[in-house]
Image (tube, rainbow, N blue to C red):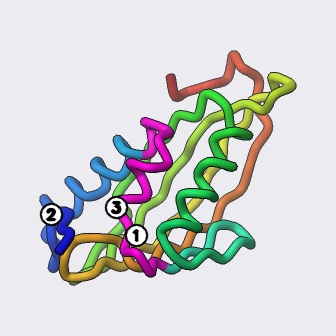
Amino acid sequence: MESRPPLPPFTLETALKKVQAAEDAWNTRDPDRVALAYTPDTEWRNRAEFLTGRDAVRAFLQRKWAKELDYRLKKTLWCFMDNRIAVRFEYEWHDDSGQWYRSYGNENWEFAENGLMQKRFASINDLPIKEADRRLR
């Protein structure tokens, strides 16, 4: 059986480790690596898109990082309890015309006993910015 420590129930220390691991993985922009953190039947809402299953997540991430170029993410723990973690995040990226954006949002995560994420619900807003205004490098 797959396992992805740290495992729930989370403490402050293990919740912080889980958030950092997610940030590190997403900053690789490797859909195959990132998708392995989710259960095979994971449920997602990302903006107005609803996904079910690891394969759908992988395909979504491939599309995302083909559009969101030079993506760089920072996640911050908001709160946690038992097998759930909430984070706030911001990330920066540019499109193929060179327009930069900072995207802000919140995610609610729910984990299976083996530490894989079984639910991810994300709300995200985009702000066009100038390249000179970037904060994440």
> What secondary structure is found at the residue carrying circle 1?
strand
Marks 2 and 1: CB-CB under 8 Å?
Answer: no
Q: Nearer the viewer, mark 1 or mark 3?
A: 3
Query: Which mark, residue 86?
Result: 1
> Is 9 placed above or below 22 here?
below
Q: Position of residue 99 (x, y in %)?
A: 81, 28
- Residue name at image x 52 percent, y 34 percent: 72
Q: Nearer the viewer, residue 123 or 53?
A: 53
Tell me the kind of residue under disc 2.
Pro
Tell me the kind of residue under disc 3.
Ala
Quadrant where the image shows the N terminus:
bottom left
Q: Position of residue 22 (x, y in %)?
A: 35, 52
In the image, which residues are magenta?
26-42
Query: Which mark, residue 6?
Result: 2
Q: Nearer the viewer, residue 105 or 59?
A: 59
Which residue matches tag 3? 37
- Residue name at image x 62 percent, y 35 percent: 92
Tell me the kind of residue under disc 1.
Ala
Q: Along the polypeptide, which appears first: circle 1 or circle 3?
A: 3
- Mark 2 crowdedness (10 Å alpha carbons): few <14, some 14-19, many ≥20: some
Q: CA distance from mark 2 to mark 3?
A: 12 Å
Q: Along the polypeptide, which appears first: circle 2 or circle 3?
A: 2
